[in-house]
Image (tube, grey):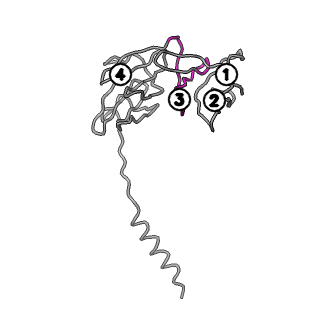
Amino acid sequence: MNVAGPFLLVLLLSVEGMAQQYSFSNYTTRNGMVNNEVRCIMQAVNGTMYFGTPTGVSQYDGARFTNYNYKNGFSHSLVIDIREENGDMLFFPISRYHYRLHNGKLNKDSTNIKIIVKNLYKQQNGQWLACTDDGIYRWNKDGLTKLPMYSETKSQALVNFVCEWQDSLLVVGRGNLSLDVFNTRTWKK
């Protein structure tokens, strides 16, 4: 008599019975979000969640939503990135402006040049890089400083994202173009 079949069936049923059950919740404008389409998500150090949408930002503290949109000073749409800096939240719409949420108050800020920041990347050394169609900039409270890697080309850089790799390489993703890798010590490909 083959007992392997019934034994295997009992084993599988007992493992399935011990499996953890997950519950899921859906949050929409009916629950208080500013928009159902989410473009970026950021969790702050304190655990608060931020959702960038085409019409502003929704902040979720685990119990309720607080929205930042046209009604309370957010005059741009399509938030494409959210970052935290020294306890403040920074919201980046497709604009030369960004917004700083400081102690619950939303303030519009701008960079020192009229360029649209598409994405930010925080390097391992704590410095920020800003991705733009014009190239990559170092971003800090004083504004933007362009990095030299695309200065030799005549075409637009169209930088969408960057990421560090190993100890001195920067991988650069560009719109409809090549994936570039630069040595951050020499800024050469």
Q: What kind of residue is marked 3?
A: Tyr
Any magenta on residue 103?
no
**Where is residue 78, by image quadrant?**
top left
Tags 2 and 1 in contact by the CB under 8 Å rule? yes
Tags 4 and 3 in contact by the CB under 8 Å rule? no
> Which of pointers 1 and 4 indicates the residue nearer the eye?
1
Distance from the alpha carbon under mark 1 to that under mark 4: 36 Å
**Where is residue 188, by image quadrant?**
top right
Distance from the alpha carbon under mark 4 to that under mark 2: 32 Å
Q: Nearer the viewer, residue 17 or 174?
A: 174
Which residue is found at the position 72% from the left and 17% from the top? 152
Any magenta on residue 128?
yes
According to the picture, the residue beneath numbered tag 2 turns out to be 172
According to the picture, the residue beneath numbered tag 3 turns out to be 121
Q: Which residues are magenta?
A: 112-136
> Which of pointers 2 and 1 indicates the residue nearer the eye?
1
Residue 27: percent from left, percent from top: 35, 38
Mark 3 or mark 1, earlier in chain = 3
Mark 2 or mark 1, earlier in chain = 1
